[in-house]
Image (cartoon, helix red, strand yellow):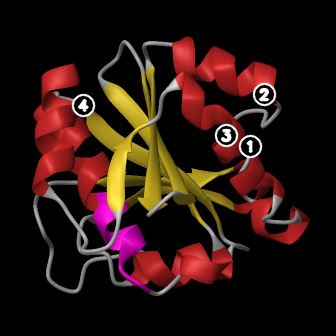
Amino acid sequence: MRGVVDEVCSEFLLPGFEFRSLGASDLLALSLLIERQGEDRLRYFQPHGFDPRTLGRMLSNPAFLMFGVWEKDEICGYFFLRCFWNRRCFVGRLIDKEFERRGIGRVMNQIMYHIAWRAGFRCMTTISRHNRAVMRSHERNPHARLLGELPNDYLLVEFTQDVREGGGIKA
Protein backbone atom coordinates (compact mmCIF):
# COMPACT_ATOMS: atom_id res chain seq x y z
CA MET A 1 0.00 0.00 0.00
CA ARG A 2 2.90 2.36 0.79
CA GLY A 3 4.01 2.24 -2.86
CA VAL A 4 0.51 3.15 -4.06
CA VAL A 5 0.30 6.03 -1.55
CA ASP A 6 3.67 7.45 -2.57
CA GLU A 7 2.88 7.13 -6.28
CA VAL A 8 -0.52 8.81 -6.01
CA CYS A 9 0.67 11.62 -3.72
CA SER A 10 3.41 12.47 -6.22
CA GLU A 11 0.98 12.41 -9.14
CA PHE A 12 -1.73 14.79 -7.92
CA LEU A 13 -0.37 18.19 -7.01
CA LEU A 14 -1.48 21.77 -6.39
CA PRO A 15 1.12 24.56 -6.60
CA GLY A 16 1.87 26.05 -3.20
CA PHE A 17 0.58 23.05 -1.24
CA GLU A 18 2.05 19.76 -0.07
CA PHE A 19 -0.16 16.67 0.23
CA ARG A 20 1.43 13.89 2.30
CA SER A 21 0.94 11.14 4.82
CA LEU A 22 0.87 12.24 8.43
CA GLY A 23 3.45 11.10 10.95
CA ALA A 24 3.55 11.19 14.74
CA SER A 25 5.21 14.60 14.67
CA ASP A 26 2.18 16.02 12.79
CA LEU A 27 -0.48 15.06 15.35
CA LEU A 28 -0.22 18.25 17.41
CA ALA A 29 -0.70 20.37 14.27
CA LEU A 30 -3.64 18.17 13.26
CA SER A 31 -5.30 18.55 16.65
CA LEU A 32 -4.86 22.34 16.44
CA LEU A 33 -6.37 22.38 12.93
CA ILE A 34 -9.39 20.46 14.17
CA GLU A 35 -9.67 22.59 17.32
CA ARG A 36 -9.81 25.86 15.39
CA GLN A 37 -12.68 24.68 13.18
CA GLY A 38 -15.44 25.17 15.73
CA GLU A 39 -18.43 22.99 16.44
CA ASP A 40 -20.46 24.05 13.40
CA ARG A 41 -17.74 22.90 10.97
CA LEU A 42 -17.33 19.57 12.77
CA ARG A 43 -21.02 18.83 13.09
CA TYR A 44 -20.98 16.29 10.25
CA PHE A 45 -17.28 15.39 10.44
CA GLN A 46 -16.83 12.90 13.27
CA PRO A 47 -14.89 9.94 11.88
CA HIS A 48 -13.05 9.39 15.18
CA GLY A 49 -12.15 11.21 18.36
CA PHE A 50 -9.89 14.21 18.00
CA ASP A 51 -8.01 14.01 21.29
CA PRO A 52 -4.25 13.33 21.01
CA ARG A 53 -4.55 9.76 22.31
CA THR A 54 -7.19 8.82 19.72
CA LEU A 55 -5.28 10.52 16.91
CA GLY A 56 -2.19 8.51 17.89
CA ARG A 57 -4.23 5.30 17.93
CA MET A 58 -5.65 6.08 14.48
CA LEU A 59 -2.16 6.82 13.14
CA SER A 60 -0.86 3.46 14.36
CA ASN A 61 -3.78 1.57 12.79
CA PRO A 62 -2.52 0.14 9.47
CA ALA A 63 -6.08 0.13 8.09
CA PHE A 64 -6.43 3.88 8.63
CA LEU A 65 -4.43 6.11 6.28
CA MET A 66 -4.10 9.72 7.43
CA PHE A 67 -2.99 12.64 5.25
CA GLY A 68 -2.43 16.34 5.65
CA VAL A 69 -2.31 19.33 3.35
CA TRP A 70 0.33 21.91 4.12
CA GLU A 71 0.94 25.45 2.95
CA LYS A 72 4.51 26.20 4.00
CA ASP A 73 4.58 25.17 7.68
CA GLU A 74 0.82 25.36 8.28
CA ILE A 75 -1.53 22.41 8.05
CA CYS A 76 -4.70 23.48 6.26
CA GLY A 77 -6.41 20.18 5.53
CA TYR A 78 -6.87 16.63 6.77
CA PHE A 79 -8.13 13.62 4.85
CA PHE A 80 -8.17 9.88 5.37
CA LEU A 81 -9.05 6.45 4.06
CA ARG A 82 -10.34 3.77 6.41
CA CYS A 83 -9.87 0.39 4.77
CA PHE A 84 -11.77 -2.79 5.57
CA TRP A 85 -11.16 -6.49 4.90
CA ASN A 86 -14.07 -6.61 2.42
CA ARG A 87 -12.10 -4.33 0.03
CA ARG A 88 -14.17 -1.26 0.80
CA CYS A 89 -12.73 1.92 2.19
CA PHE A 90 -14.45 4.99 3.53
CA VAL A 91 -12.99 8.42 2.94
CA GLY A 92 -13.39 11.81 4.56
CA ARG A 93 -11.83 15.23 4.46
CA LEU A 94 -11.69 18.53 6.30
CA ILE A 95 -10.39 21.81 4.90
CA ASP A 96 -9.67 24.83 7.08
CA LYS A 97 -12.24 27.52 6.33
CA GLU A 98 -9.50 30.02 5.44
CA PHE A 99 -8.28 27.68 2.68
CA GLU A 100 -11.57 26.77 1.00
CA ARG A 101 -12.16 27.38 -2.71
CA ARG A 102 -8.51 26.97 -3.69
CA GLY A 103 -8.75 23.53 -5.30
CA ILE A 104 -7.53 21.65 -2.24
CA GLY A 105 -10.66 19.47 -2.02
CA ARG A 106 -10.37 18.42 -5.66
CA VAL A 107 -6.79 17.21 -5.13
CA MET A 108 -7.73 15.50 -1.85
CA ASN A 109 -10.47 13.63 -3.73
CA GLN A 110 -8.10 12.59 -6.52
CA ILE A 111 -5.60 11.25 -4.00
CA MET A 112 -8.20 9.37 -1.93
CA TYR A 113 -10.01 7.90 -4.93
CA HIS A 114 -6.86 6.81 -6.75
CA ILE A 115 -5.29 5.22 -3.68
CA ALA A 116 -8.47 3.22 -3.15
CA TRP A 117 -8.90 2.20 -6.78
CA ARG A 118 -5.26 1.29 -7.39
CA ALA A 119 -5.19 -0.80 -4.22
CA GLY A 120 -8.34 -2.64 -5.38
CA PHE A 121 -10.83 -1.06 -2.96
CA ARG A 122 -14.29 0.32 -3.53
CA CYS A 123 -14.23 3.96 -2.40
CA MET A 124 -17.21 5.06 -0.30
CA THR A 125 -18.43 7.77 2.03
CA THR A 126 -21.49 8.73 4.01
CA ILE A 127 -22.96 12.23 3.69
CA SER A 128 -25.63 13.93 5.73
CA ARG A 129 -28.40 15.46 3.62
CA HIS A 130 -28.18 18.40 6.02
CA ASN A 131 -24.53 19.10 5.22
CA ARG A 132 -25.27 21.58 2.45
CA ALA A 133 -21.64 22.34 1.57
CA VAL A 134 -20.75 18.69 0.99
CA MET A 135 -24.01 17.95 -0.80
CA ARG A 136 -23.37 20.92 -3.10
CA SER A 137 -19.80 19.84 -3.86
CA HIS A 138 -20.87 16.28 -4.70
CA GLU A 139 -23.71 17.39 -6.99
CA ARG A 140 -21.08 17.99 -9.67
CA ASN A 141 -18.74 15.12 -8.81
CA PRO A 142 -18.83 12.81 -11.86
CA HIS A 143 -17.42 9.91 -9.80
CA ALA A 144 -20.17 10.04 -7.14
CA ARG A 145 -22.94 7.47 -7.28
CA LEU A 146 -25.70 7.20 -4.70
CA LEU A 147 -25.98 3.63 -3.38
CA GLY A 148 -28.72 4.15 -0.84
CA GLU A 149 -30.21 5.99 2.07
CA LEU A 150 -29.13 5.39 5.65
CA PRO A 151 -30.80 6.27 8.96
CA ASN A 152 -30.81 9.87 10.22
CA ASP A 153 -30.82 11.42 6.72
CA TYR A 154 -27.43 10.06 5.69
CA LEU A 155 -26.60 8.85 2.20
CA LEU A 156 -24.23 6.05 1.22
CA VAL A 157 -22.14 7.16 -1.76
CA GLU A 158 -19.58 5.31 -3.86
CA PHE A 159 -16.92 7.00 -5.96
CA THR A 160 -16.41 4.97 -9.12
CA GLN A 161 -13.65 5.11 -11.70
CA ASP A 162 -16.08 5.47 -14.53
CA VAL A 163 -17.09 9.07 -15.10
CA ARG A 164 -20.78 9.57 -15.73
CA GLU A 165 -21.95 12.56 -17.71
CA GLY A 166 -24.23 14.59 -15.51
CA GLY A 167 -22.98 12.47 -12.59
CA GLY A 168 -23.08 13.46 -8.99
CA ILE A 169 -25.65 13.09 -6.26
CA LYS A 170 -28.79 15.11 -5.88
CA ALA A 171 -30.34 16.12 -2.57
Closest to the camera, between mark 4 and mark 1, is: 1
Q: Do the residues labelled 2 and 1 touch (CB within 8 Å)?
A: yes
> Is residue 71 visible from the viewing direction of this image?
yes
- Name the residue at the right extreme: 39
Which of pointers 4 and 2 lies earlier in the amino acid sequence?
2
Q: Which mark is residue 52?
A: 2
The disc labelled 3 sits on which kind of residue? Pro
SS category of the residue bearing label 3: loop
Q: Is residue 50 magenta?
A: no
Q: Nearer the viewer, residue 19 or 90?
A: 19
Residue that numbered label 1 is attached to: 31
Residue 93 x %, y % = 52, 55
Marks 3 & 1, CB-CB < 8 Å contact: no
* Among the two numbered marks 2 and 1 on one chain, the one whose residue lies closer to the N terminus: 1
Q: Upstream in the sequence, badge 3 or badge 1?
A: 1
Please tell me the numbered disc located at residue 121. Answer: 4
Residue 171 visible, this orientation: no
Residue numbers of the magenta segment: 102-109
Give coordinates of residue 102: x percent, y percent. 41, 84
Element at label 2? helix
On the rendered structure, is 168 left or right of 92? Answer: left
Please identify the quarter of the rendering in which residue 40 is found: bottom right
Query: Residue 47 got which mark?
Result: 3
Question: Which residue shows up at 64% across the image and 34% down it?
Answer: 27
